Each structure stands twice: as C-alpha cells, then as structure tokens.
Amino acid sequence: MELQILLLLTLYASHVSATVFTVGVGKDETTGQKGVGFDPSVIVPSKSDQIVFEFRSGSHSVVQSTFEQPCTPKEGGFNTGVKSVADNLDVDAPGLPTTTLAVTDSQPLWFFDQAGGTCNQGGVLAVNPTVGSQTAAAFKENAMKATMAPANSDTTANISSTIHGATVAPTRASSTQTTPRPSKVNAAAVIAASQVALSSLAGIMLGIAMGVL
C-alpha cells in the first residue's frame, strides 16, 4: 500500500513539475504581431516538458531539420503538416490550431517553418541549443545562407525524378546519323557496259597493230 502511494506521489510530482512552452508560429517575437518566424525562437525545455506550437494567420508548418541544414527536412523527423489560419483573425485570437510535441530528452532540436517559406528570413526555432558551436545564433545564420527545400517536398521519395519506382529520364533528340544504304546494282547493265568497253579496247589495239605493220 505504501509503495502504491509513493508511486502515485511520484507520478503526480512529475506531472506538476512539467512545463508547457507555447511557441507562436508565424509570429514576430520582436513585435508580438503576425510576421516571420517563431515567438520565442529559442527555448530550453527539460525532459517531460511539452512544446505547444500555436499557428497564426497564413499557412505554416513546423518541420524538424538539422543544425547543418536548417531549411531541409530531417528524414523521419517531426512535422506538424500544413496549418492554415484565416488572415482576419487577431494575432492572439482564441481557438488557434495547435500541435503538441513532448520533449523526451535535453538534446538540441532544430525546426523551421517550411510552409511559410521564411527559413531564409530567420523563420527557425532552436530547442536546447548548445553553448559551444551549435548556438541559436549560428543556427539562424546557417538558415539565412541555406538552400530552401520546396514547401511540398517529400523527404522519403524524390517525386520529381521517380514515379512508382521508375526513374524518368529526360527525352533527348537522337544524335545518330543515318548512313545511306547503297542502291541495288543492275547486273545486266554492268555486263553490257563491260562488253562495250572491251569492244572499244579491242578496236583501238587492232588499229595500233595495223599501223605498225
């Protein structure tokens, strides 16, 4: 009985101590208004905490990436999918769509707003950045210089070059030149021409011989 009570108290304490981090997507953290990026753009949650992504006006998606490639989806990473919100809603209107992410450890996590297309403008989120080389500032700097993935890109298949497993190669005009076939030879005409030539040659030789004699 005492063990059960202790377990219940432990579970209750862990639940009470968990912190919820609300992050506005499509909200400017400097003005608090609708805009580019995340508000806040840097958070430091602990294990068992929760991150609640709250989407503002427009189309946005929170997609996990990597420190080295901030604007490219991480294969198998977290992805909220595209969330669309009416433009006429207030920035902090009640009932905005949300997606919750449970934090399972204290490792760094990196995200960007793919559907919003603002990664190169600083639309990134750093979760538990390090004090050393992988800082939030360095992550944002990488994003400003990175190549952005298309908003409808698929991280599991390159649909631009593969259709149902078959690679589609570009169609090219053939550069092979056709060699003309030789025309058929008329054997009778060749024989007749040969006979004429021989007759002419025989006549010439006969004339030369008679002149000599």
Image (cartoon, helix red, strand yellow):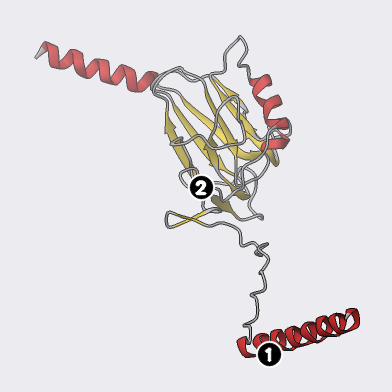
- Dot 1 alpha-carbon crowd within 10 angstroms: few under 14, some 14 to 19, many 20 or more: few
**Number of callouts:** 2
Give SS at disc 2. loop
Which numbered tag is attached to residue 76? none
Going by the picture, which residue comes out furthest to the right? Answer: 211
Residue carrying label 2: 154
Foreground pick, 61 / 56: 61
In the image, residue 193 above or below residue 44:
below
Between the C-alphas of marks 2 and 1, the distance is 76 Å
Please provide percent x and percent y for residue 168. Answer: 53, 57
Which amino acid, mark 2?
Asp
Image side of residue 7 versus residue 212, left or right: left
Which amino acid, mark 1?
Ala
Image side of residue 97 versus residue 210, left or right: left
Quadrant in which the N terminus appears: top left
Residue carrying label 1: 192
